[in-house]
Amino acid sequence: MISFTGWNVVPKILINLMFAVYSAMCLIPILLVLSISFTDEKSLVTDGFHLIPKLFSLIGYQYVFSGTSTILNAYMVTILVTVVGTFLHLFVTSLMSYAISRNEVKYRNQIAFLVFFTILFNGGLAPYYILITRYLHLKDTFFVLIVVFLVSPVHVMIMRNFFKTLPDAIIESARIDGSGEFMTYFRIVLPLSTPVLATIGLFISVAYWNDWFTCSLFIENNKLYNLQYLLQSLMTNIQILVSNQNASRSIEQSIGMLPGESARMATCMLSIGPIILAYPLLQKYFVKGLTLGAVKS
């Protein structure tokens, strides 16, 4: 009798090879950005881009860190906004989602429809700006960087569908034992919801970390600038200096060629560095959190 055991190994090798190639395709651009950030600007102009710098230079990072205290302050603002904003987003979103997922709550379907309606339509930028500045009086405050992402209708719907997958018998047993709604929520529902909380938490933390638009609209105090807005301002300053011939000559005489691409890549590495570390820690929750939260209606 012919054994086909060897044939089962071939598909596994092909699958592993396919994922290895895909991983390399994802990793090579990051390595290229890292290499460009450490490459001298003149070498980039003459030799082009390479995975290994032909002429090593720190001029891009020197330009970015020319105002070290400002960069560090922007890092602190961004980290604080990301941590506090993610916690509050998960707390508020999970409370609302849990409420409209329970069958005993009146008008839960109507509330869910209103939440879904905001996904399709919104008031626009002008009413949004007037609401934040004139009625909530949050312009040029730290909390405005948090409140803009405090609730996401998409995340509410995902969490609502996830909570509906939890067995009703567990919640009913807690109520029979004398547990109140908040005790049931904190002691039973949340511990069982780690996959969806981790998934939504990573999504919203990335949104907080990469947000620069809110800062450009509502923040005028430079002590409240977040990292992304500050780095974008640095890139704008480079473009202004390049367009100004006199300023470009004076800078080139003092520090050499004005860092253009190397400074841009340095800002990319500084912006993605800390947040990218969260992916390996939370990746195992992605599939379970999204499938259980999105499939069942």
Image (spheres, rainbow, N blue to C red):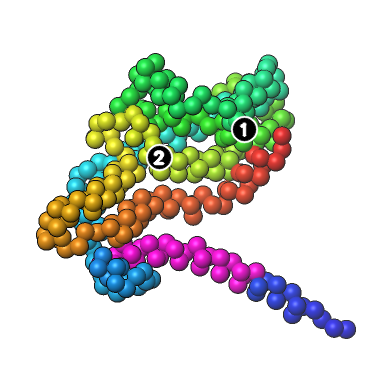
- Which quarter of the image is occupied by the N terminus? bottom right
User: Residue 57 at x, y = what percent?
Assistant: 24, 66
Position of 123 with respect to 139 (left or right) is: right
Label 1: few (<14), some (14–19) or many (≥20) C-alpha neighbours in 10 Å: many
- Which quarter of the image is occupied by the C terminus? top right
Q: Nearer the viewer, residue 89 or 262?
A: 262
Query: Label 2 near label 1: C-beta < 8 Å?
Result: no
User: Residue 151 at x, y = what percent?
Assistant: 50, 29
Q: Residue furthest right?
A: 1
> How far is the residue under mark 1 from the one under mark 2?
23 Å
Label 2: few (<14), some (14–19) or many (≥20) C-alpha neighbours in 10 Å: some
Q: Is residue 290 above or below residue 39?
A: above
Earlier residue among tags 1 and 2: 1
User: What amino acid is labelled 2 in the image?
Assistant: Asp
User: What amino acid is labelled 1 in the image?
Assistant: Met
- Foreground disc of the pair 1, 2: 2
**Residue found 16% across the figure and 63% down from its top:** 256
Q: Is residue 34 covered in magenta?
A: yes
What residue is pinned by disc 1? 157
Position of 95 with respect to 161 (left or right) is: left
- What span is colored magenta in the figure? 15-40
What residue is pinned by disc 2? 211
User: Quarter of the image holding residue 188?
Assistant: top right
Q: Is residue 160 above or below residue 108?
A: below
